[in-house]
Image (tube, rainbow, N blue to C red):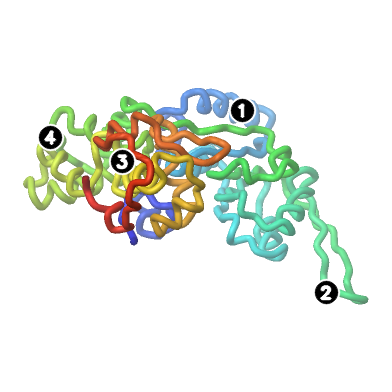
Amino acid sequence: MAIDRVLNSDSTGAAEETYNASLRPRTLKECIGQQNIKDKLSIAIDAAKQRSEPLEHILFYGPPGLGKTTLAHVIANEMGAAIRVTSGPALVKQGDVMGLLTNVGAGDIIFIDEIHRLSAAVEEFIYPAMEDFKVDFTVDSGLHAKTINFPLKRFTLIGATTRAGLLTAPLRGRFGMLYHLDFYTPGELTEILRRSAEMLGLKCESKTLELIAARSRGTPRIANRLLKRVRDYSQVKGAGKMTLDIVSKSLEMEQIDTLGLDELDRSFLRALIKVYNGGPAGIEAIAATLGEERDTLEDVVEPYLLQIGFVRRTKRGREATPAAYAHLGMAIPKANERPVTQQELFEEQ
């Protein structure tokens, strides 16, 4: 059963990308949150500029929507460098990488999103490019095959991934700087929303942005998307002004509860509690029960549920915690209860 949610695992849509880009900060000073990472990047950027050298290769990892792509663009702006953006699944063969590398200027930045999805052949091909700034490209095949050595201009590779554990050790070891992005605090999200509201020219009553921030799952991308949806609701139902009542009704219509959980999150918890008696249950079993992809649950749903302590991972599988029961208003299930249907899992309690 398909469910609309504020954050999905595929965020490459052109319209959404254009909207996000209009709200993205362009400098480190404009960035809000991730202070430790900003401090380290600021020093590295200043040092690289003083030496007139490109930055070392950088790896950003963490849940979706925390600003990995934004930071890559900020770094490019701070360095005064051009940035070329691609993704792991888009680089299928060595020829794809050659077209990218040979067009890179000195000091330019290559940003590869979802870098853990590079094929083995492509990954091994870029090793010498990252280390020695040269590649060996094989032309033709069989008896007519020959290898051509291409020298490259010094560049910076910035990789981003939501699944750092899937990166191979050789690839991970070739990055000079590795940064994990954490979830944002409600205060940081409020500041991000205030900046976005000003850029969008929105009129907001006191405490409205705080209410949106509290339900944004610690993620700026979700906060900005909720702000956009509240803006639409207020334009139609509230004469364009965002009041507490308008915001509350808008979030209720989006099925976002007080902790920022949407219907897919709650269905995940109900599956653990009703079908598997609170767990432990394997992620494949839960995905089959919900009719969702495993990657969607692991990349989009689980990180926040783990962060707020509603789910715990064990060697035997996922388990719901007492906090999850309390939030859903459910009692601990008894043994041998009747299994529920998929439709019941998606019904509001």
**Label at residue 244:** 4
Distance from disc 4 to disc 2, alpha carbons, whole Å, reads 66 Å
Which badge, 1 or 2, is on the more N-terminal residue? Answer: 1
Left or right: 258 in relation to 109: left
Q: Position of residue 324 (x, y in %)?
A: 34, 34
Q: Tag 4: residue type?
A: Leu
Q: Tag 2: residue type?
A: Asp
Give the labeled residue for mark 1.
44
Which numbered disc, 1 or 2, marks the residue closer to the eye? Answer: 2
Which badge, 4 or 2, is on the more N-terminal residue? Answer: 2
Q: Tag 1: residue type?
A: Ala
Left or right: 28 in relation to 159: left
Distance from disc 1 to disc 3, alpha carbons, whole Å, reads 37 Å
Which badge, 1 or 4, is on the more N-terminal residue? Answer: 1
| Quadrant where the C terminus is found in the figure | top left
Q: Circle 1 — which element?
A: helix
Which numbered disc, 4 or 2, marks the residue closer to the eye? Answer: 4
Which badge, 4 or 3, is on the more N-terminal residue? Answer: 4
Q: Position of residue 308 (x, y in %)?
A: 39, 30
**Label at residue 261:** 3
Which badge, 1 or 3, is on the more N-terminal residue? Answer: 1
Is label 2 in contact with label 3 (beta carbons under 8 Å)? no
Q: Position of residue 221 (x, y in %)?
A: 37, 43
Q: Circle 2 — which element?
A: loop
Is label 1 in contact with label 2 (beta carbons under 8 Å)? no
Give the labeled residue for mark 2.
140
Vertical position of residue 317 compared to residue 46: above or below: below
